Image (spheres, rainbow, N blue to C red):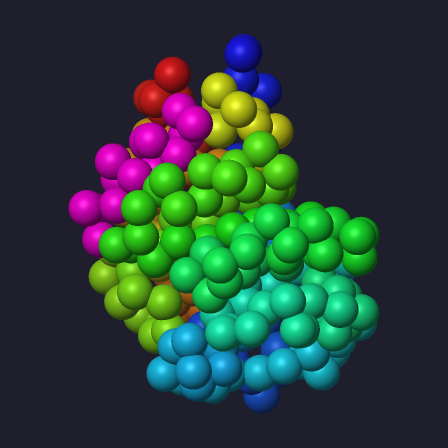
Amino acid sequence: MAATRRPLRLAPSLLSADFADLASAIREAERGGSDAFHLDVMDGHFVPNITFGPSLVRAVRARTRLPLDIHLMISDPLRYLRSFRSAGGDTLVFHVETTDDPATVVRSAHELGAEVGIALRPDTPLDRIDSVLERVDQVLVMSVQPGFSGQAFLPSVLPKIEAARRALDDRNPGADLSVDGGITPETAVPAARAGATFFVCGNSVYGHGSVVENLRSLRSAVLRGSRHAVP
């Protein structure tokens, strides 16, 4: 099957922004050309940390028209799909490690009118998502261990990204291939070269300097890498 990939997109992670001034963080990212926003929901169970719930997603939704990519790092995603969809989530991303029945989660999210993504920890084999690969709108390969911001990119995940790219091009070319964790102008190049199309970027956007310039640097890096992406 000829691949028809989604366009390359950048999604700043609001977990790295200043929560006391999220409205400004959103505006600056929009000025810098953000394509979406990524929101990390952590429950203190699947991952050690606790972040926020639907109320913050609702507040972000009121301040932007860009798509909201909701990363559910929680142990019971099926229970909370409706809440996060109602709050304004456009894509609901859950971890395959949290369920023995990913097909039901995928179907339920689609029934709510959301796009659905399935995420894998760095050490989770790609074949864990084989049964739903053709039904998801996004595959998220974690390039750090989920649960903590500010970690360094793990180069060991690049072969998995390449394998996911080949699988999607063969079976579901319209889906996003997302990468999350340690994305900087330096690491975005090999991630794009490996075939990623959706780049979650946190500290490299909000951790220093100008948000606008940081996003422009990231986009330049992604474009450089994509010119040499896996076929």
Instruction: Identify which residue is drawn at 54% across, 67% down.
Output: 72
Residue 51 visible in the current orientation: yes
Please count the marks in the image.
0
Give the quarter of the figure containing the N terminus. top right
Instruction: Identify which residue is drawn at 55% across, 53% down.
Output: 102
In the image: residue 177, left or right of residue 112: left
Quarter residue 151 falls in: bottom left
In the image: residue 141, left or right of residue 59: left
Residue 58 in the image: above or below residue 191:
below
Residue 214 visible in the current orientation: no
Image x and y of residue 220, in percent: 42, 38
View extreme (left): residue: 156
- Please say whether residue 162 is one of the residues in the magenta stretch: yes
Instruction: Identify which residue is drawn at 60% across, 49% down.
Output: 103
Residue 142 in the image: above or below residue 50:
above
Magenta range is: 154-167
Residue 208 in the image: above or below residue 132:
below
Give the quarter of the figure containing the C terminus. top left
Q: Nearer the viewer, residue 44 or 20?
A: 44
Image x and y of residue 136, in percent: 60, 42
Instruction: Identify which residue is drawn at 67% across, 73% down.
Output: 80
Image x and y of residue 211, in percent: 49, 62
Please tell me whether the stretch drawn in magenta is mainly helix, strand or loop: helix
View extreme (top): residue: 2
Q: Nearer the viewer, residue 212 or 174?
A: 174
Residue 132 in the image: above or below residue 210:
above
Quarter residue 52 falls in: bottom right
In the image: residue 26, left or right of residue 128: right
